[in-house]
Image (tube, rainbow, N blue to C red):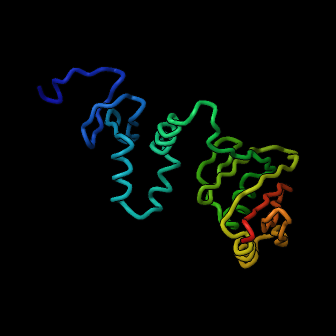
Amino acid sequence: MTAAETPRTFDHEHCGCCGRQLPASEVVELGTTPGVFICVGCALWAARRAGPVAALRQLRFTPLGALARRLTGSRATPGTAQAAVPILPSADLDRTAAFYTAAGFSETERHDGYLLLHNSGVELHFTHESTPTPGQCFVHVADAVKLCKQLRERGTAGAGEVAEQDYGLHEFVLTDPDGNRIRFGSPTS
């Protein structure tokens, strides 16, 4: 029986790369070629072949990345938290994007009244509010002292002084134009 003659079940799709028939929840349809699906394994293989690790990082923010997160998350114990993402207020999303881009973040998505920024594994979300009440969050980094120095060298406004805390962290606060306070910290040793 050829692939064209193979009976198709609606809860399964064939990967257009490896040809395996998989549950529909384990493949994603390619946006530019409707009816063609690819599995996570083939998507990761293609990303590795296409370029450096940066390609894999970008994959996280695509439908394939969402699929991979959903699949790996499905193995976790139900109710187990995977991550927390702060949603901070912004009176001007363009100004917020410019501020955090200068601080080393990348704008990855924008929707009506909503902005998503990333830096390595850190994700910040902003929602438009005409009169924002400032929020705050904590971001773990490898070296807070080095990061603060880099921000100051870039001329990023709002970067406070690094302080060694009695609980074993170097910390500093970055205050954005809306008054949001992002506290960065790393172990002292």
Q: In which quarter of the image is the N terminus?
A: top left
**Residue 179 is drawn in which quadrant?**
bottom right
Q: Farthest residue to the left: give it.
A: 1
**145 up-or-down from 5: above or below:** below
Left or right, 168 with reference to 17 = right
Position of residue 21 measured from the top left corner of the image (x, y, whole percent): 28, 31
Numbered marks: total = 0
| Towards the viewer: 75 or 126 | 75
> Which residue does the image show at 62% across and 59% down from the upper left?
119
> Which residue does the image show at 39% across and 43% down from the upper left?
40
| Towards the viewer: 90 or 74 | 74
Position of residue 158 measured from the top left corner of the image (x, y, whole percent): 83, 67
> Which residue does the image show at 34% across and 40% down from the upper left?
38
Left or right, 170 with reference to 142 = right
> Which residue does the image show at 29% across and 33% down from the upper left?
14
Position of residue 18 measured from the top left corner of the image (x, y, whole percent): 26, 42
**Residue 130 is drawn in which quadrant?**
top right
Q: Farthest residue to the bottom: give it.
A: 153
**77 up-or-down from 124: above or below:** above
Q: Quadrant of the C terminus?
A: bottom right
Position of residue 96 measured from the top left corner of the image (x, y, whole percent): 74, 56
**33 up-or-down from 169: above or below:** above
| Towards the viewer: 116 or 73 | 73
**165 up-or-down from 74: above or below:** below
**Residue 98 is drawn in which quadrant?**
bottom right
